[in-house]
Amino acid sequence: MPGRDPQPVSDEYFMLWVLIAQTKDAILRARELEYARYGISNERRAVLTIIQNSGGRATPVDIARDLFRELHSVTEMLVRMEKDGLVTRHRGTGRSKVEVSLTEQGLDVFHQSLHSETDARIFSALTKKQRERLSQYLWKLRGRTLEHLGVPEWHFNFITQPGETKASDDVEAGPVQAGQGPGAATVSELIADSEIG
């Protein structure tokens, strides 16, 4: 009715989405400021990583799939990156007509931008165990979302994959399939986790 004070709506799932979206946008902004030193954006940095972690060569289709972007937008970005001297396109060796590799300049930028100080400052707010659990939760949500969209699961060549429980903190995590990992946590459980350690 007119004149009544609007009441806040409690929607746990919506608030989780808002929290994830705000966190992602804030981290992206912080990383953009750092990568500006190297003259690249987050997406360009991701492209360099995908190519390097794919054995030094990747197809535009592979890159578009791993970035979850439309092929035409990735193709346009690769054209601009080639003009800037970061990548080179050449005839593919398999079914793909085109493959992309890093130039010497692109490889140099890739190595310079490794081990982000911004990432370390932000994610060190969590303990190593909490970061591993967060990776597992996000990997599980990612798998459910791809399933919901009808998009086939794919393997992205992370330097370290979200992993299974490890015997030692010194051992890097192995790959985990979508749907595996710990059970879904409630908001209150996640908040409680953030207050431990």
Image (cartoon, rainbow, N blue to C red):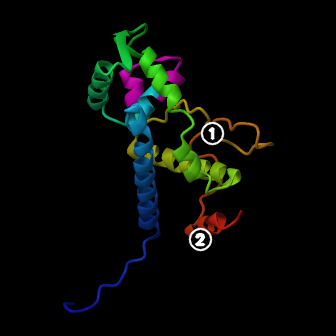
| Residue holding disc 1 | 176
Q: Position of residue 131 (x, y in %)?
A: 63, 51
Rendered position, 122 above or below 51? below
SS assignment at label 2: helix
**Image coordinates for residue 11, horizontal then vertical, percent:** 43, 72
Residue type, numbered disc 1: Val
Residue 120: give x, y in percent of width and height: 58, 46
Q: Which residue is mark 2?
A: 188
Q: Is residue 64 magenta?
A: yes
In x, y percent, where is residue 53? Answer: 53, 24
Position of the C terminus, as image quadrant, is bottom right
Outermost residue on the right side: it is 167
Q: Amino acid at mark 2?
A: Ser
- The residue lying furthest to the bottom in this view is 3
Q: Residue at x 45, y 45 (%)?
A: 31
Front residue of this view, candidates 109 and 11: 109
Say few, some or many: other residues with alpha carbon within 10 Å of mark 1 (under 14 / 14 to 19 / 20 or more).
some
Number of the front mark, 2 or 1 = 2
Main SS of the magenta segment? helix
Q: Which residues are magenta?
A: 49-65
Task: Identify which residue is drawn at 42% across, 32% down.
Answer: 38
Find numbered disc 1 in the image and state the secondary structure of the residue it sits on.
Answer: loop
Question: Which residue occupies the foreground of this view, 65 or 193?
Answer: 193
Q: Residues within 10 Å of mark 2 (few under 14, many from 20)?
A: few
Query: Per the image, is 67 magenta?
Result: no
Rendered view: 115 above or below 1: above
